[in-house]
Image (spheres, rainbow, N blue to C red):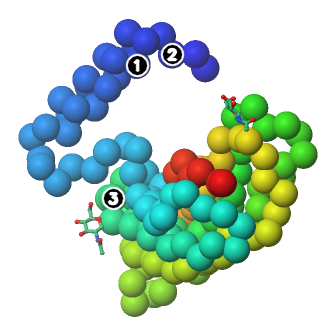
């Protein structure tokens, strides 16, 4: 789908208008989790920290069952860069809306490309007959690989 710029602006304005009354309102962009990667400039072998907060996701109806983290090239992929799995996480039942862990950037072959850390959040939804099934939503955080 191609949104025109004015449509996108109108949508943004509507989002802000809707978000203004309640200071704690969650942005739609937080739907699959708020992710912080630190640091964001990395070389192979570097250790870095990923922090994920699902407070807003839960308020928007997304309660994670599993969370998978990948390094990906979402745009202009050269066709030879499959997503690299960084971690598969199950949230702690005592802290189901927050996760923090460290990982090492794998010694893969990296190119001059726009990399992101992709979080794929798997969560349950209710089907037409009331039964539960799982769907996946993703959120990207840009990183630089040197
Ligand atoms: C998670 O996000 C919520 C909403 O933005 C915020 O209020 C809360 O402090 C965050 N939790 C942590 C542990 O950072
Ligand atoms: C990397 O890609 C950017 C954008 O395409 C380009 O401007 C830059 O010259 C490239 N660097 C190298 C070392 O190829």
Residue density around tag 1, few if under 14, some if 14–19, many if 20 or more, within 10 Å = few
In what element is the residue under mark 2?
loop
Q: Quadrant of the N terminus?
A: top right
Query: What residue is shown with label 1?
Result: 8
In what element is the residue under mark 3?
helix
Of the four image quadrants, the one with ligand 2 is top right
Label 1 near label 2: C-beta < 8 Å? yes
Question: Residue drawn 25% across and 23% down?
Answer: 13
Q: Earlier in the sequence, mark 2 or mark 1?
A: 2
Q: Earlier in the sequence, mark 1 or mark 3?
A: 1
Q: Which quadrant holds residue 90?
A: bottom right
Q: Which quadrant holds residue 114?
A: top right
Query: What residue is shown with label 2?
Result: 3
Task: Mark yes or no: residue 76 visible.
Answer: yes
Taking the image as shown, residue 46 lies to the left or right of residue 82, namely left
**Structural distance between the alpha carbons of marks 1 and 3:** 22 Å
**Structural distance between the alpha carbons of marks 3 and 2:** 25 Å
Task: Mark yes or no: residue 86 visible.
Answer: no
Question: Residue drawn 40% across and 65% down?
Answer: 54
Query: What residue is shown with label 3?
Result: 56
- The percent coordinates of residue 111 (x first, y second) are 78, 46
Beta carbon at label 3 within 8 Å of ligand 1: yes
Residue density around tag 2, few if under 14, some if 14–19, many if 20 or more, within 10 Å = few
- The percent coordinates of residue 75 (x first, y second) are 69, 34
Which residue is outermost to the bottom?
94
Q: Earlier in the sequence, mark 3 or mark 2?
A: 2
């Amino acid at each position: 789908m191609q949104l025109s710029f004015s449509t996108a602006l109108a949508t943004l304005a509507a989002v802000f208008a809707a978000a203004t009354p309640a200071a704690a309102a969650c942005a739609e962009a937080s739907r699959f989790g708020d992710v912080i990667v630190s640091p964001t400039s990395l070389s192979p072998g570097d250790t870095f920290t990923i922090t994920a907060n699902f407070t807003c996701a839960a308020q928007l109806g997304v309660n994670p069952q599993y969370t998978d983290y990948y390094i990906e090239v979402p745009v202009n992929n050269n066709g030879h860069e499959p997503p690299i799995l960084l971690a598969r996480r199950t949230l702690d039942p005592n802290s189901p809306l927050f996760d923090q862990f460290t990982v090492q950037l794998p010694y893969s072959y990296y190119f001059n490309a726009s990399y992101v850390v992709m979080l794929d959040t798997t969560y349950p939804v209710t089907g037409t007959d009331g039964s539960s099934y799982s769907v996946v939503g993703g959120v990207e955080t840009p990183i630089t690989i040197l």
